[in-house]
Image: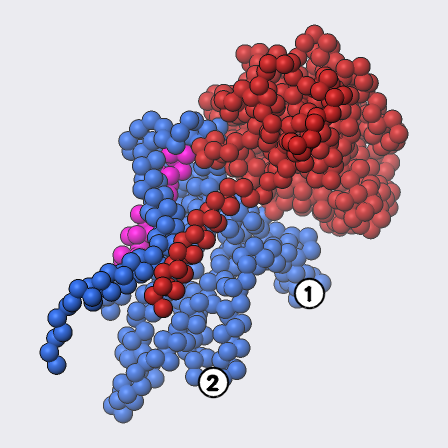
Chain colours: A red, B blue
Amino acid sequence: MKTIRKALALVLALCIVLSLAACGSQGSNESKAPDPTKEPDQTQTQSPETPPAGDEVAKEITIWIYPVGGWSDEKNVKPLLDKFTADTGIAVKYEFLAYADGDDKVNTSFTSGGTPDLIMEGPERLVVNWGAKGKMVDLTDMIDATDKSELNEAALAACTSPDGKVLEYPMFITAHCMAINLDAFKEAGADQYIDLETRTWSTENFFKAVDALYAKYNDTVAAVFCKGQGGDQGTRALINNLYGGKFTNADHSQYTWDDPNNIKALEALKEKDGKGIAFDASLEGGDELKLLYQDVLKMAFCWNVAQQLDPASQHGDPGKTMGGSEIVCMNFPTESGKAAELCGGIWGLGIFDNGDPARIAASKQFIKYMCDSENAADAAKISNFFSARSAAEGTDLSNIFADNDIMNEYNKIFLPSLGEYYNVVPGWAQARTSWWNMLQKIGTGEPIADTVATYMAEANAAAAG
Amino acid sequence: MAKQPKTAMTRALQRRENIAGYLFMLPSLIFFLGFVVFPMFACVLISLTDANMISEGMLGNFVGLDNFIKLFQDKEFLEALKNTFIIVVVSVPTVCAFSLWVGSAIYKLKGPVLSAFRCIFYLPVVTGSVAVTVVWQWMYNNYYGIFNQVLGPKGLGLIQGRINWLGDERFALWCIILILFTTSVGQPIVLYVSALGNVDQTLVEAAQVDGATDFQVFWKVKWAQMMPTTLYILVITTINSFQCFALIQLLTKGGAGTNTVMYHIYYTAFKLTERAGHFGYANAMGVVLAIFIGILSAVQFKLAKEK
């Protein structure tokens, strides 16, 4: 009996130890590593992705991927990573992060260990946050004169730190816009206020459209969502564009939310609160989209072409609501009625400096493969965004969606309206928090100018470090 | 009977038994030391530094009590502290009173009826908190939630238009308290049913024979005997209320006047990573919260002991 008890205790202790050990390897996937018993393909060993002889390159790297368009879907990503592995002999462990807790995971990995080699996201994280803390590898040596001429200038600038180091290799870009339920607009007679050809409308017409929709549906038709930071580029773009306000100063060192044009926009929106527009602290960008799909809201401020193309998010029918109404991309309204300054989306790859030259070399090889080779077209295509460069090693990337009408239209109408990328002001995380807190307070009826001043001061304090 | 002298054989057996006992304890002990004791000490230590999770290593520079001084000048923290106290002050007495009321109403029931009641009240406790919260989120939804439909013009007509339950500062915290209440009453009810069933009936009968009223019987006899159970319920409910986090994270993310100390700790430690020393600061909040819980629990123990 005692022997059994002792054995049982030992088994229990072993289980605990093993389960702890297992925690360390949970949740990650791996692209198929090449069979070490097989000879490498001769054609591969001579490919441009192979590093020069003598450089030590790790045989396995890890990448964490934020949900960047189609790169959040394993069925898109895995074939590309498998191809990379087959071509280079470097296995890639990959893990998908969520915006809800991705930052937590990365931040805790700095102290607890397990920081990945590569990360895919935008400059607001890779350059402004982790880059400024010295966590990212300088990729300047990967960009020569040809690359500079091929890369989107604004994207490269956003991926470069103030001291001139390229801390993120730009991969895709898009312009965030808004969307409307066109059928609802037609039913309410609000389609007269929009220019469907150029997808533009004036501020005056925007409010007339809200009135018409409210008169027809007697309910909230648009939400200034402010539960959290999710999709906040939409509310920023709306408020900045209504009367031409600015979010930051020209050199992106300070926030300028108290721009009189922003205050005017907030006052105009607040005036419509409860009369078609709601300052809604129970919604984030994702919730707003759901309500648009469900035919509850008649417009959404958090939109881009990836959503327009994604059938999964729209219950199988891209560009339609659940009730079958047509969803149409629109510019944000401006006072002149001309095209808005759209917030840009820039995403790319960065390398965490884990102090292992072999892993850094392998990671650079990965970046070269995905961003600056004939594979860059596939890498950009699966994202549903536009490539951040016009060409790569002789491959034309400017027209990779030639067979897709929606992308072509988007490329023609919205991409030229891409505004300055201001997400590079220091203290960005704090500023985003202050922004939605500010909107919540305005929604409760606090004085607008004072509230804006209070929260802008908080954001600027973070910007000043 | 004469006491048997301890032989070498019995001592060896005893030693073996002890070793086996310790081995059984080992798994729990590893967890307890690794995930409770060590983090407690680490938390106190880090609260005295400007540690930042981005910086190399866990500890930053020693800053003494700076974090604690800053805490009580931080209006966000004070707001979170106020909200936390509102939750505790409202939910602890209501949970205790309601569960005592339900417990005393059902403890005399027999068989399947009693089991059915226990099951109904205990169900929210064993259901996953995320699942429960998602259902509540749907019920509170501003646009298609059941509350607005039932209370609105198309239902009972008690409200005009819609109430943004989770987005309006006037309602959001109370909505959280209501969910916390429903998920907290299950265990106290089961405990009170059991405690009431174990009350010494001879004392009850003696009091009745002496002419005590029902209230006097309850207050002087039953309540006194249930005091250990009440104390346990008070302490557990207080701690749970102080630690309210998942509901806030899932429903409001600390917005609409629902920020609590627990959520604020998480937010400061893991979201505001650009703020210098954010990790040390978050640990200081943890220490303050632990002190408050400790003080309140001590007061509860003392009052219960006096009673």
Q: Toward which corner of the image does residue A48 lie, by quadrant?
A: top right
Residue drawn at (88%, 29%) of the image:
A403
Which residue is denoted by mark 2 in the rendering? B110
Q: Is residue A415 above or below residue A283?
A: above
Q: Position of residue B142 (x, y in %)?
A: 65, 52
Q: Is residue A84 left or right of residue A356?
A: right
Q: Residues within 10 Å of mark 1 (few under 14, many from 20)?
A: few
Q: Which mark is residue B155?
A: 1
Residue A256, visible in the rendered structure: no
Magenta residue check for B278: yes
Return the residue nearer the eye: A381 or A200.
A381
Q: Position of residue B26 (x, y in %)?
A: 35, 54
Q: Main secondary structure of the magenta part?
A: helix
- Name the kind of residue labelled 2 in the image: Lys
Q: Secondary structure at mark 2?
A: loop
- Specify the farthest residue to the bottom: B209
Query: Which range of residues does the magenta coloring cover?
Result: B275-299
Q: N-terminal of the two: label 1 or label 2?
A: 2
Q: Is residue B299 above or below residue A79?
A: below
Return the residue nearer the eye: B62 or A289.
B62
